[in-house]
């Protein structure tokens, strides 16, 4: 129990990866943790897509960054450029949680399982909602056909890999967000 709480306390959003491939047994352990998530009525309204194809990830990254660079509001583009210029931070692996419509809560639970499992295995990770932008680019339909099963939609993604800086710092918890009654 204490290890679980320590894992939650020390997990941070890693935004810089070495690019080193992850061992297959670690990938399988994370994927298993994902599908072990609870869901409403045990419907399990998700599919987990594990992308380790570096060329595909780089293409998705470049396509999305190109789209962002052409937008009138450049704030997202500039923020990513300030963090190294890569939407996916050179991560060697992306877990996409494809979900059935209107199952955001279940998608969130799966996403947290992936992030915590990766941390427990000594891997950096970041929950990356911006990956949804990939599906709004000129090549969005192509990516959707390749990655998202029929009847599902993009829910969330988690980038996973070995961090370039193992000394990442978790955010400071805001204790004012807790209310005790009784």
Image: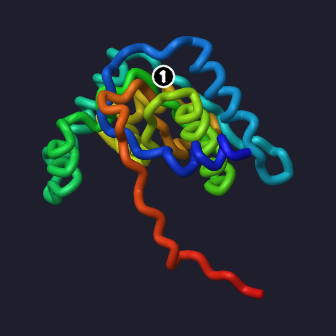
> Can residue 61 be seen by looking at this rendering?
yes
Name of the residue lying farthest toward the bottom: 182
Q: Residue at x 18, y 37 (%)?
A: 85
Q: Residue at x 41, y 33 (%)?
A: 141
Residue 180: quadrant of the picture: bottom right
Residue 19: quadrant of the picture: top left
Q: Residue at x 23, y 30 (%)?
A: 62
Colour mode? rainbow
* Residue 19 vertical position relative to residue 94 in the rendered view, above or below: above
Name of the residue lying farthest toward the right: 41
Residue 29: quadrant of the picture: top right
Q: Is residue 166 left or right of residue 4?
A: left
> At numbered mark 1, what does the secondary structure look like: helix, strand or loop?
strand
Q: Position of residue 182 (x, y in %)?
A: 77, 87
- Residue beneath disc 1: 51
Q: Position of residue 46 (x, y in %)?
A: 67, 39
Rendered-image quadrant of the N terminus: top right
Q: Position of residue 107 (x, y in %)?
A: 63, 48
* Residue 24 vertical position relative to residue 127 in the rendered view, above or below: above
* Foreground residue among 100 and 61: 61
Q: Is residue 165 left or right of residue 155?
A: left
Q: Position of residue 78 (x, y in %)?
A: 15, 50
């Amino acid at each position: 129990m204490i290890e679980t709480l320590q894992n939650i306390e020390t997990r941070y959003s890693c935004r810089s990866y070495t690019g080193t491939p992850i061992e297959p047994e670690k990938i399988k352990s994370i994927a298993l943790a994902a599908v072990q998530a609870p869901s409403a009525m045990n419907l399990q309204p998700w599919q987990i897509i594990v992308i380790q194809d570096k060329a595909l990830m780089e293409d998705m990254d470049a396509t999305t960054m190109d789209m962002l660079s052409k937008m009138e509001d450049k704030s997202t583009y500039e923020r990513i450029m300030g963090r190294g210029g890569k939407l996916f931070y050179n991560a060697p692996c992306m877990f996409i949680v494809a979900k059935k419509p209107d199952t955001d809560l279940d998608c969130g639970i799966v996403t947290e399982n992936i992030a915590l499992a990766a941390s427990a295995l000594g891997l950096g990770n970041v929950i990356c909602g911006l990956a949804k932008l990939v599906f709004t680019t000129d090549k969005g339909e192509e990516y959707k056909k390749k990655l998202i099963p029929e009847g599902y939609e993009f829910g969330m993604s988690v980038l996973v890999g070995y961090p370039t800086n193992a000394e990442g710092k978790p955010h400071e918890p805001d204790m004012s967000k807790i209310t005790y009654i009784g």
